[in-house]
């Protein structure tokens, strides 16, 4: 019943303690039902995780590995680690699990023989799609597209952004070329990476942004130096300042409006300045800067940004890789902004399982083989997405997100008011919430203590604790989270008072 | 029994013809057994494919779409289209299907409950790998790594190459930095895409190369202008000439040796020239340039290229995305070259289902979060790869590839000798074979006629017909291919004689 490993790595008295705790935790996690709450047996990483990490260290860099997971035992909002610790998961695999672990609807998907076959007959979808493919694409467009008529499927967020950027470049040059053929000079120079075939165009991105780690998306990413160091970059692509608001918003309205104005002015200055020198073919932006610290901007900021895009002929690319698929309480976060027009391109991945982008008719590339790769997506992920959308709709999960989000927000607000020397700048939509700690060290301590107490959470930026629970996170999960958060903050507060 | 669509799009006499042909073809494709041979009912694309393509055209660009496929009915080496035409597939979804369609061993994989769960509990593998993950990675390294101790999993070929290139850049700068910390200047400048943090380094690639369509890998890709037009590029990255041999090799040995020498000299010149100006951190090369036209280079060329890499401190990145996983008769194509050392990095994808790269200990990036993304691979694909490797081993499929390759090569050689005004430059290893037609038009005609006669084949470069069958392609499949190829060539030859 208990593995050899356990008896190897723990001495006898610890074994007894471990087994007692384990028996008590196991009551929580029988039969793939969701556990009643967190249950901690060992430190994290525990002895089994440590042993497996040692093994994994032989095959690749495990610097970012926190612990190993028993995915068979994880259920709903709870992740169960190799040592059978049960944690409430508010981070959900970097915000990628819309329905938590082992959701019964998803478990059924590949018990269907046709769906199963789609996993092992993986087509080159751009060339030989399956007969079911047009209907699947139509369904996804009809059900979740943000009023954009076209879809280009991909496999990950970075590739979606790479191809969104390429689409913007092609649209820009096609407009300049005005339906004329490519010139011979363009064809010849392009093969050798030179203009005019490979033109000196640019994409405008924002300080604090994260759009991926492939080399071109990394040129649009400015959240952390460690992601970018030593990697050559498109050094001429312009970078504008993202609004950084003062919180609480209701007390800082005028000041934040000024911040919006200044940032928009900077964007317009860059667009003018770049008209001749690396013209801006597109602006890429997250509706909420996620990796960069959960930085929000106002609907007015986005509305005016879209106006600037239209004025200067740049495509507006909204990157909903982290914000999309419901966590903000609307299916897409930018729906909060009441934009007069849909964006030209909107990219998605993560919770959606499949990745890609929706786009307008006008920006759709006309010639084949330009926005293209071998697989062009993955039917297995698309089938999962269909099942996910179905669960979101039939179980009204966006309502759930708004209710649980409200509970989380109110609880954190109270905590922030009680501990103003530790917590500040609470912000969020739906359950897509963040709160800042005073300083990076304190933030890291809070996250470590949360984990010790059975809550898996995530960080972003320099000070933020970010919440990224699944869409099935309910009010009672919020209460468990808030209880543990309160306990952690109270203890750290006492400790700090002792120290100073 | 016959869908509404069929009766809609065909008139009555054609209906009867269609149904008669269909009944005759269906004898071939019952019960998921491999059909006995190709069987053509309609033109390609047939009426059902056309109808579905019209539907698909509403949701994305279908310029590259050839026809729609009934993946449930496709089996082994035969692809069955929407109109139930049965084609012998020598292109296998752009060379991605190692075991053909609906292989029984793969169909079983996800009937295992634990494997099934891995599909719906997709981890962020860099942070929270499953308890089974270390063993899976170890197994793959042990079974197929080309003597490289480390693996970095990814999801597609382009991302594998992006991260291989990043790894080379980081290794180059780390060596220069000599274990010192990043400077403040590096950290600050990197966030803004500027040197010294984002240094002016380069990757050397070859004319005719294909390494992907993300923007940085596109800077290393020089096979077709249409892939590159309008996309900004790293214009300072050097491009060397790839050897372009005269065939048959045995009659042109001295000349081809000279070509090798000239190309290597050019590489060395570029490495010297770039020492101060965009130093070359790595050389990326395919063992056989695939998209660029199935261009082969000699073992001596690769051995000397490796020497140059070592002499000038550049990483040798071998891109086995298309050549890997057996089609050349060895698991990795570069094993044909007897390199004195393994390459620093070798990338893979396609037939492997999972993607990524193997690499040396020295080049492995030490700090976390530099070579990283959300998913870092996909357990579902890894589990498929394990099953694929198992079938390759137990059924000695590399032997099969060599036997079938020999049969194909001999048959094509005979044909080339008979029709020297139409075919030339036969070349290949295993079943990874290509033959050139005299001119692009003729090549395209041959491929179209092959398709009409029930053979799906692929093209590459300007003149080449490329063979990319599955590893389960046997001698009798080769015979069917050769019979149809002979028929097509003979008919086209007669037609040409009538014309001129």
Image: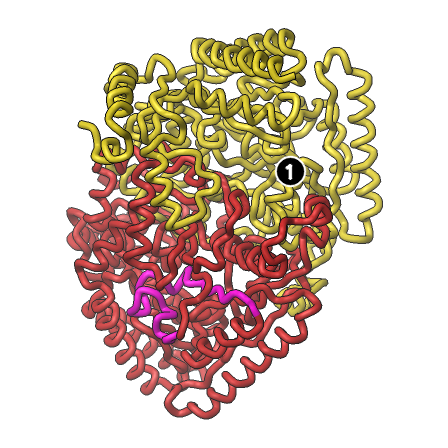
Chain colours: A yellow, B red
Q: Nearer the viewer, residue A138 or A334?
A: A334
Judge left or right: residue B134 versus residue A428.
Answer: left
Q: Quadrant of the N terminus of chain B?
A: top left
- Residue B174 placement (x, y as % from top left): 59, 56
Residue to which mark 1 is pinned: A223
Q: Is residue A339 visible?
A: yes
Residue at 53% across, 46% down: B367
How many discs appear?
1
**Residue name at image x 35 percent, y 68 percent:** B467
Q: Which residues are drawn in magenta? A: B313-339
Q: Is B84 left, or right, of A269 in this rendering?
A: left
Residue B7 visible in the shown view? no
> Could you say where residue A438 lies in the image, as x and y percent from the top left?
66, 21
| x and y, in percent, of residue A79 in the image | 37, 25
Q: Residue at x 45, y 31 (%)?
A: A93
**Label 1: chain letter:** A
In depth, the one of B145 and A173 nearer the eye is B145
Q: Residues within 10 Å of mark 1 (few under 14, many from 20)?
A: many
Q: Main secondary structure of the magenta part?
A: loop
| Residue A309, placed above or below residue A248 | below
């Amino acid at each position: 019943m208990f593995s050899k490993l356990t008896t190897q790595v723990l001495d006898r008295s610890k074994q007894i303690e471990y087994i007692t705790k384990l028996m008590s935790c196991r009551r929580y996690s029988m039969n793939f039902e969701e556990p009643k709450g967190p249950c901690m047996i060992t430190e994290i990483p525990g002895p089994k995780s440590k042993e497996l990490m040692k093994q994994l260290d032989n095959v690749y860099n495990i610097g970012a590995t926190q612990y190993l997971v028993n995915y068979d035992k994880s259920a709903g909002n709870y992740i169960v680690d190799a040592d059978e610790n049960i944690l409430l998961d508010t981070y959900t695999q970097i915000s990628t699990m819309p329905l938590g672990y082992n959701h019964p609807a998803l478990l059924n998907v590949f018990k269907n023989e046709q769906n199963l076959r789609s996993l092992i007959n993986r087509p080159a979808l751009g060339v030989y799609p399956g007969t079911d493919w047009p209907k699947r694409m139509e369904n996804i467009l009809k059900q979740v597209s943000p009023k954009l008529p076209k879809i280009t499927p991909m496999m990950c967020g970075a590739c979606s952004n790479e191809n969104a950027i390429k689409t913007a470049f092609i649209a820009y040059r096609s407009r300049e070329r005005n339906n004329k053929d490519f010139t011979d000079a363009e064809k010849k120079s392009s093969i050798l990476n030179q203009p005019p075939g490979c033109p000196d165009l640019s994409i405008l991105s924002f300080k604090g942004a994260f759009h991926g780690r492939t080399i071109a998306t990394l040129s649009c990413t400015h959240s952390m130096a460690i992601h970018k160091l030593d990697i050559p970059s498109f050094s001429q692509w312009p970078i504008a300042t993202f609004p950084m608001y003062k919180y609480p918003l209701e007390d800082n309205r005028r000041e934040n409006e000024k911040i919006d104005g200044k940032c928009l002015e900077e964007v317009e200055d860059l667009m003018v300045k770049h008209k001749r020198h690396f013209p801006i073919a597109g602006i890429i932006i997250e509706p909420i800067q996620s990796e960069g610290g959960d930085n929000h901007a106002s609907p007015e900021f986005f509305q005016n940004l879209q106006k600037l895009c239209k004025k200067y002929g740049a495509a507006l690319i909204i990157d909903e890789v982290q914000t999309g698929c419901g966590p903000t309480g609307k299916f897409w976060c930018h729906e909060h902004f009441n934009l007069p027009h849909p964006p030209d391109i909107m990219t998605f991945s993560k919770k959606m399982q499949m990745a890609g982008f929706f786009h307008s008719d006008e920006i759709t590339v006309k010639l084949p083989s330009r926005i293209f790769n071998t697989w062009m997506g993955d039917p297995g992920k698309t089938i999962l997405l269909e099942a996910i959308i179905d669960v979101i709709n039939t179980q009204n999960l966006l309502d759930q997100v708004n209710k649980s989000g409200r509970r989380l927000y109110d609880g954190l607000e109270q905590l922030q008011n009680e501990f103003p020397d530790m917590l500040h700048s609470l912000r969020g939509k739906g359950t897509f919430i963040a709160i800042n700690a005073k300083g990076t060290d304190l933030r890291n301590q809070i996250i470590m203590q949360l984990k010790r107490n059975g809550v898996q959470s995530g960080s972003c930026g320099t000070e933020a604790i970010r919440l990224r629970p699944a869409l099935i996170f309910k009010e009672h999960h919020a209460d468990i989270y808030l209880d543990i958060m309160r306990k952690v903050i109270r203890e750290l507060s006492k400790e700090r008072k002792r120290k100073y």
